[in-house]
Amino acid sequence: MFRQGEVVEISTSTQVFRGVFIKEEKDFLVVKLSNGYNIGIAKRNIKGEKSLGMVRREENTMKKLKEHIRGKALPLISILHTGGTIASKVDYSTGAVIARFTPEDIIGLFPELRSMASIRSRLISNMLSENMRFSHYNLLGRAVEEEVRRGVRGVIITHGTDTLHYSAAALSFMLENIPVPVVLVGSQRSSDRPSSDSAVNLISAVIFIINARAGGVFVCMHESMNDSSCLVVEGVNARKMHTSRRDAFRPINKGLVARIDYENKRVEWLKDLEKSRGEFNIKLFKENIKVGLLKAHPNLLISELECFKHFDGLIIEGTGLGHIGISETDKLTKENKRIGELLAGLARRIPVVMTSQTIYGRINMNVYSTGRDLLRMGVLGNYTDMTSETAFIKLAWLLSNYKKEEVRELFERNLRGEISDRTEKEYFLV
Ligand code: GLU
């Protein structure tokens, strides 16, 4: 077998691949092609293979890249890294999976960027996104603010996909009147073959930024299972809808912002972006704010709610139009009544908000008696259509920045596009 860093020529019945050998997996070989991307070649298709010797790094490459990055002609884009799959790559000289963050590395990894943008790049954190805390949103928000004040054309944030939509919502609320696009990208890499979705997502984000005429916070990820296009979704409406597919990020109760035709490097606009008129301003999270997120379910126990007595706010991800079992309908439902009493006490003291586990659709607590009882208790969120994740982030951010009475009022008011005016049928399963 080849050694890492060896230049190889591998032929199948239809093609000849020449590149740098990276590693061998059970069913395929991974080779880095001269355009910088990795491909997997299925062993069963290999008809011939030969070594062309060890790779020699072109001495001038780093110098040339640095000169390019200093060049003023191209739009300046800043890439902030927070970790996840997209930030790591196999280093062909050592075989290790490493995270690389300098602008030179980024252009080395994504060679197409060379002709598209001047890149600034820095590491904010290097973590799996499930470990994020409000403090990380503040770090990230401040870093974006710094880049924007420096005059960049846009900011790309590389992020683990699991909680990418929470961060997108957090930044949407934090960065008031953001004048340039901030685009979160991730990578859903399938485990059975090397994937190029990180490159497609990142370069599509660059195409979007270069063409956008207004600011905002967006998510840019694959449209389908192939690499031909990406979708841009508003940060407050995005949701991860699949554990592993590359096209997992979809807008909920909202339309798309744009489609990026990756092959032709073009943007198809599906929505007009509105230029913000106010002054750019950042409003951070209070790091010790306590907001809970409870999923309603049959046979709920009062002990599942009791801890929220010490919280500042609570989201209930209810059933259907916005329900949770609070009624004693027979002798088997006494616990529900106690839950209702506890909830009424909570709703008097802290904002308690209803969202729906149906994911799509709007809360309407006027239809059934349960909803009307919840409304009488002061449960918020009627007629809103935010995802539970966005509602959670919004409530925490409001509690961090506004007085209690203002929080109740602002929660049901559309601040960043998180609540839509109308329920359009074409917004379902976009
Ligand atoms: N749990 C990881 C994360 O969200 C998954 C890897 C990835 O999506 O990049 O960071």
Image (spheres, rainbow, N blue to C red):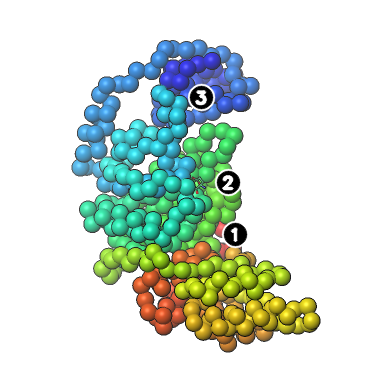
Does label 2 or label 3 sit earlier along the sequence? 3
Q: Mark 2 — residue?
A: 245
Q: Which mark is residue 178?
A: none
Residue found at x 49% / y 62%: 237
Is disc 1 placed on a helix, strand or loop? loop
Tell me the quadrant of the picture where the C terminus can be found.
Answer: bottom right
Q: Mark 3 — residue?
A: 23
Q: Nearer the viewer, mark 1 or mark 3?
A: 3
Image-quadrant location for residue 371: bottom right
Residue found at x 58% / y 83%: 344
Q: Is mark 3 within 8 Å of ligand 1?
A: no
The percent coordinates of residue 361 (x first, y second) are 59, 69
In the figure, 152 relative to 353: above or below?
Answer: above
Q: Is residue 204 left or right of residue 335?
A: left
Does label 1 or label 2 sit earlier along the sequence? 2
Q: Is residue 87 left or right of residue 74?
A: right
- Kind of residue at disc 1: Leu
Q: Is mark 1 within 8 Å of ligand 1?
A: no
